[in-house]
């Protein structure tokens, strides 16, 4: 269980590194973050990070019920026909969000037997070039463990790391991530996303 959690967290960290590298491109629509100088908890309990240039960095918070209602990711992934999903213990999950001037990301973590499954939705406030963004996502993974797919007409990148998969689905203003379980489970959850 810990190995799976470490694998999923490593994948997320690599994803964030990829986004940061993409942000360094002069044509990038993704914000490039400055070095963190100070962290503060504001009056709502959200973590606000102040940069050296005095620009606000992402705020970490619990999403409002209005934000949750607008999500395209499924909040109930349990299913008796899929073995891993018949063991989900936290439906609906607790959600965590981060937001800044360029994007908002809402993540749901599910405990399902031996798996810790991540389902997330990142909304970009400006549209991205799908081809460039797809190429960026492909660069996050070794070519031999990556597969290009189409999910409901959207480009997707599936990374299979010894049976534990991560799926990135790219639209013009959103990036959906489903990670931390076997291929069948990941694709089943992805099919529940509203595009």
Image: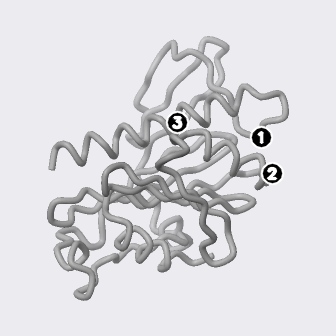
Q: Is residue 38 above or below residue 154?
A: above
**Marks 1 and 2, how far apart at CA:** 9 Å
Farthest residue to the front: give it. Answer: 144
Residue 85: x percent and y percent?
25, 75
On screen, residue 147 versus residue 123, left or right, reads: left
Farthest residue to the bottom: give it. Answer: 81
**Marks 3 and 1, how far apart at CA:** 15 Å
Residue assigned mark 3: 16
Disc number placed over residue 129 in the picture, else none: 2
Residue assigned mark 1: 29
Badge 3 element? helix
Residue 7 placement: quadrant = top left
- Residue at 43 percent across and 55 percent down: it is 166
Residue 170 placement: quadrant = bottom right
User: Decide: marks 1, 2 in contact (CB < 8 A)?
Assistant: yes
**Marks 3 and 2, how far apart at CA:** 18 Å
Q: Nearer the viewer, residue 102 or 114?
A: 114
- Residue at 52 percent across and 17 percent down: it is 36
- Tag count: 3
Q: Which is more N-terminal, label 1 or label 3? A: 3
Q: Which is more N-terminal, label 2 or label 1? A: 1
């Amino acid at each position: 269980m810990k190995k799976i959690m470490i694998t999923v967290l490593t994948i997320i960290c690599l994803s964030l590194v990829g986004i940061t590298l993409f942000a360094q491109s002069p044509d990038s629509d993704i914000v490039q973050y400055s070095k963190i100088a100070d962290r503060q908890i504001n009056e709502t309990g959200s973590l606000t990070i102040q940069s050296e240039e005095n620009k606000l960095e992402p705020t970490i918070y619990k999403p409002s019920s209005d934000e949750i209602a607008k999500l395209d990711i499924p909040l109930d992934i349990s299913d008796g026909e899929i073995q891993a999903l018949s063991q989900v213990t936290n439906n609906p999950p607790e959600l965590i969000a981060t937001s800044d001037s360029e994007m908002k990301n809402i993540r749901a973590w599910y405990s399902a037997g031996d798996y810790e499954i991540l389902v997330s939705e990142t909304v970009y406030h400006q549209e991205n070039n799908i081809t460039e963004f797809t190429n960026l996502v492909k660069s996050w993974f070794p070519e031999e463990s990556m597969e290009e797919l189409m999910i409901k007409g959207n480009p997707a990148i599936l990374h299979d790391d010894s049976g534990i998969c991560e799926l990135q689905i790219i639209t013009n203003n959103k990036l959906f991530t489903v990670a931390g379980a076997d291929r069948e489970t990941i694709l089943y959850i992805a099919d529940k996303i509203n595009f």
